[in-house]
Image (cartoon, helix red, strand yellow):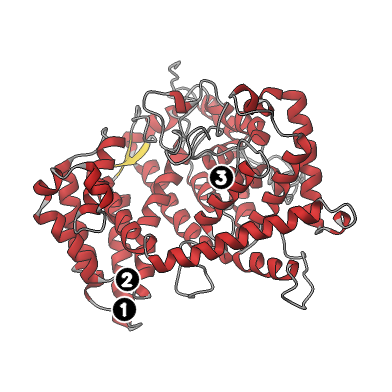
């Protein structure tokens, strides 16, 4: 990569900031905004978008209708934004990092905050479960090679389907903010070339998921229809970072998301009594006392006996070695287990949450203490591992986040009662897509489909026509990869429009619409509140 110096004149730095602003916004009176003003305009447009307000009705882990005490995607996004701004301000205040920040393309707190507010806009009803269901439907039913992915849907909303910007095509955000939203700056397949999945050590998310070989990257931030927007957003950074790397502000947002997720979901499930001290303590203590013995257990036995004490944590330790050898250390991992046991088990979980002032204070203190510790562990790296961004955590804090996330996965996400609940939600989404697809294909009734779905169909039809003319190789990927004839453009457009429509619903709207389509309610459905 060509080396670039950013120690030049004020005029040169102003030119860099102007490039980061390109594609951007007019201010409130319709004149070109300064870079600082444009970034604040971006943040405000995102925060006032109905797509953002919708997140209050979208699941974080458990459906928001189950308990008002739980985080939803809106409250999660607000907390990620708080952490992201703190990290960006911390980097800006560190004089030893100033030259490197400039060299890597800059880090503005407003940009980092805007990206954090926007990062979950693309989450469909029922959160990650809905994401998996819609991806399978998009690929298998409609032949969409790029399927469905929450990060790619976020970028599509910001650049295409949210019509509340001045041009009514996306939000007309600055290049810097659009680039900062690109947590995984590649498509599922075919972009950029060479694709990051072909690297010896692919970036996090770029490799194929082992459970779905041949489908492309597990995580990606753009569909084929938005690749021009990706190229335009990242153009100001092409001399500073590699094509597969996050911008500094995207790395800030990504790290802030990890921090918020690690802390706040544990608080939620302590509040409602799901996270029990005895079970968490038993697992952590057993691994600590028997670490050497567990290290000798064969991988096959760990996989088939995952409920034995200590086995789940040992499996996680080995996964870290396999994927993140650049940072993992057994000694640091062991210290992280001890710290989490002390802070979480002996601290927060030591008393049952009873709604008292003391219980609320304990949660607040836990959150504040951990946020301070993790934000205090932020480091800026000029040449990070391909598995990391330029902004990451010191080894101690990195391991602690992994252990905190493991507690959430082991004692919340793997619970059988949650699985039962999620199977019902998956069935609801599949049935909803079935009903909408039948309606769109009904030669006598198609013109009565919801107006928003009609507009999305028109949009997708024009997009796939443009792809056929300008990037036909993307539509020919199934044939090129030996997967058979590619689907017709009408099928692709219908699929993308229906998936866009369903993904724009809240949890409750999805259930209500299916009831209406199935004749289980006498109240007429109105799409007045569908985005």
**Vertical placement of residue 78 versus 253, above or below:** below
Q: Residue furthest right?
A: 444
Is 366 left, or right, of 83 in this rendering? left
**Vertical placement of residue 356 versus 241, above or below:** below
- Residue 375 placement (x, y as % from top left): 33, 50
Is residue 426 something one can see in this rendering?
Answer: yes
- Residue 193 placement (x, y as % from top left): 54, 21
Mark linked to residue 149: 3
Q: Quadrant of the C terminus?
A: bottom right
Crowd around label 1: few <14 · some 14–19 · many ≥20 (10 Å): some
Q: Which residue is mark 2?
A: 363
Tally of numbered discs: 3
Crowd around label 2: few <14 · some 14–19 · many ≥20 (10 Å): many
In the image, 110 versus 493, the foreground residue is 493
C-alpha distance separating marks 1 and 3 = 36 Å
Q: Which residue is mark 1?
A: 353
Quarter assignment of residue 449: bottom right
In the image, 487 versus 411, the foreground residue is 487
């Amino acid at each position: 990569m060509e080396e670039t110096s950013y120690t030049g004149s004020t005029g040169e730095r102003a030119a860099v900031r102007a490039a980061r602003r390109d594609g951007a916004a007019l201010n409130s009176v319709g004149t070109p905004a300064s870079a600082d003003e444009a970034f604040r305009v971006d943040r405000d447009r995102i925060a006032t978008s109905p797509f953002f307000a919708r997140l209050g009705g979208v699941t974080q882990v458990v459906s928001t209708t189950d308990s008002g005490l739980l985080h939803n995607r809106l409250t999660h996004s607000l907390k990620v934004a708080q952490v992201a701004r703190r990290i960006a301000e911390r980097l800006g205040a560190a004089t030893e990092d100033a030259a490197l920040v400039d060299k890597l393309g800059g880090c503005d707190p407003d940009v980092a905050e805007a990206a954090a507010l926007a990062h979950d806009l693309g989450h469909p009803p029922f959160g990650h479960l809905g994401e998996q269901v819609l991806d399978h439907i998009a690929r298998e039913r409609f032949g969409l090679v790029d399927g469905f992915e929450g990060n790619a849907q976020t970028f599509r909303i910001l650049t295409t389907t949210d019509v509340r910007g001045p041009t009514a095509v996306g939000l007309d955000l600055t290049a810097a903010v659009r680039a900062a939203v690109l947590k995984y700056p590649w498509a599922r397949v075919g972009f950029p070339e060479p694709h990051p999945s072909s690297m010896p050590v692919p970036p996090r998310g770029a490799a194929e998921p082992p459970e779905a070989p041949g489908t492309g990257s597990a995580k990606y931030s753009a569909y084929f229809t938005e690749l021009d927007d990706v190229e335009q957003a990242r153009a100001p950074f092409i001399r500073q970072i590699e094509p597969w790397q996050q911008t500094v502000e995207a790395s800030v947002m990504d790290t802030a998301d990890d921090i918020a997720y690690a802390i706040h979901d544990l608080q939620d499930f302590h509040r409602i009594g799901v996270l029990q001290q005895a079970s968490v303590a038993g697992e952590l203590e057993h691994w600590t006392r028997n670490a050497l013995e567990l290290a000798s257990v064969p991988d096959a036995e760990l996989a088939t006996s995952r409920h034995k004490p200590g086995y789940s944590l040992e499996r996680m330790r080995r996964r870290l070695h396999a994927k993140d050898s650049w940072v993992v250390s057994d000694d640091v991992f062991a210290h992280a287990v001890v710290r989490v046991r002390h802070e979480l088990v002996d601290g927060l979980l030591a008393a049952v949450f009873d709604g008292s002032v003391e219980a609320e204070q304990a949660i607040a203190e836990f959150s504040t203490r951990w946020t301070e510790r993790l934000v205090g562990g932020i480091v800026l790296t000029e040449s990070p591992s391909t598995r990391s961004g330029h902004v990451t955590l010191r080894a101690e804090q990195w391991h602690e986040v992994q252990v905190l996330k493991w507690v959430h996965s082991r004692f919340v996400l793997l619970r059988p009662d949650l699985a039962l609940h999620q199977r019902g939600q998956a069935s609801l989404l599949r049935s909803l897509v079935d009903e909408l697809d039948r309606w769109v294909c009904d030669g006598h009734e198609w013109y009565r489909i919801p107006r928003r779905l009609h507009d999305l169909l028109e949009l997708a039809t024009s997009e796939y026509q443009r792809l056929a003319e300008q990037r036909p190789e993307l539509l020919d990927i199934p044939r090129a990869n030996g997967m058979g004839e590619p689907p017709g453009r009408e099928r692709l457009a219908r699929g993308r429009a229906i998936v866009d429509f369903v993904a724009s619903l809240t949890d409750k709207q999805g259930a209500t619409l299916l009831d209406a389509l199935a004749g289980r309610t006498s109240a007429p459905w109105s799409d007045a509140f569908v985005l």
